[in-house]
Image (tube, helix red, strand yellow):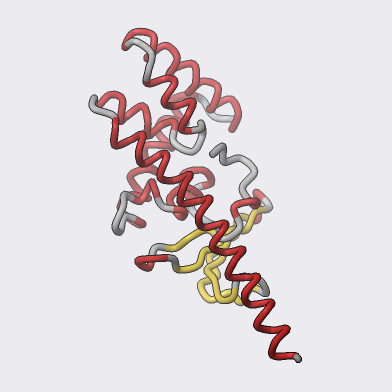
Amino acid sequence: MKIRSQRKHNMKKRIAFYLIALIILTSCLSYRGLYGDLKEQTDKTMFTYLIYWRSPERIQEIMNYPVDKRRVVFNEEIKAIAEEIGLTENDFLRQQSERIRDVNMRFGYVVRGMFTDKGMIWIKYGEPERVDENYDHDLYGTVEAWVYTTKDKVFYFTKGEQRIPQLVNPAADTIVKR
């Protein structure tokens, strides 16, 4: 009886994990797809400043504006994002550039690092304050935990397909606008 209960519990964990992974993958693919459709380098640069701060739909909307209007709307969005997180526009642009460069180098495997779950969290929150590499979680099993004590957040990553770490608790990120 105890074995059956344990199997049922494990099955629920797997189903929850795969549903969350599907939601995350679908979201990341929409950012990847949008980036892949951009032809101009200026648009790709603007995209990197907006990724994970604005939804793919909002970014697409901005990219559909005529070039002169697009730049104005982009600047308005940058100003709004910087205000949301308490930075100047220049500080936000500098921080975002550094983080995109960092995640592309650190987490780029099969895809660019900025399209990975670890890249998404790093872009939003920066380098974790603490990393517990073999954290034993009741629901997710052995995971890597990224701890942001000053932000009161913990993100758990497990190895996904092709050994790319996948975020298993997306609800912990209340800022990401997917």
- Vertical order, 30 against 2 (above or below): above
Q: Residue at x 55, y 22 (%)?
A: 80
Residue 133 falls left or right of residue 38 = right
Q: Position of residue 50 (x, y in %)?
A: 44, 31
Question: Which of the two residues, 122 or 175, is positioned nearer the viewer here?
Answer: 175
Please state the horizontal and vertical placement of residue 62, each as a whole percent of the image: 42, 19
Q: Is 90 located above or below residue 105 in the figure?
A: above
Q: Quadrant of the C terminus?
A: top right
Determine which quarter of the picture holds residue 97: top left
Which residue shows up at 30% across the image and 59% down it? 109
Q: Residue at x 63, y 77 (%)?
A: 10
- Foreground: 105 or 136? 136
All told, the count of numbered labels is: 0
Q: Between 110 and 130, which is closer to the camera in this rendering? A: 110
Q: Position of residue 171 (x, y in %)?
A: 64, 51
**Quarter of image, res 8:** bottom right
Q: Is residue 120 above or below residue 9?
A: above
Outermost residue toward the top in this view: 68
Q: Quadrant of residue 66?
A: top left
* Left or right: 168 in relation to 127: right
Q: Is residue 5 left or right of residue 173?
A: right
Question: Which x, y percent locates residue 82?
Answer: 53, 27
**Quadrant including the N terminus:** bottom right
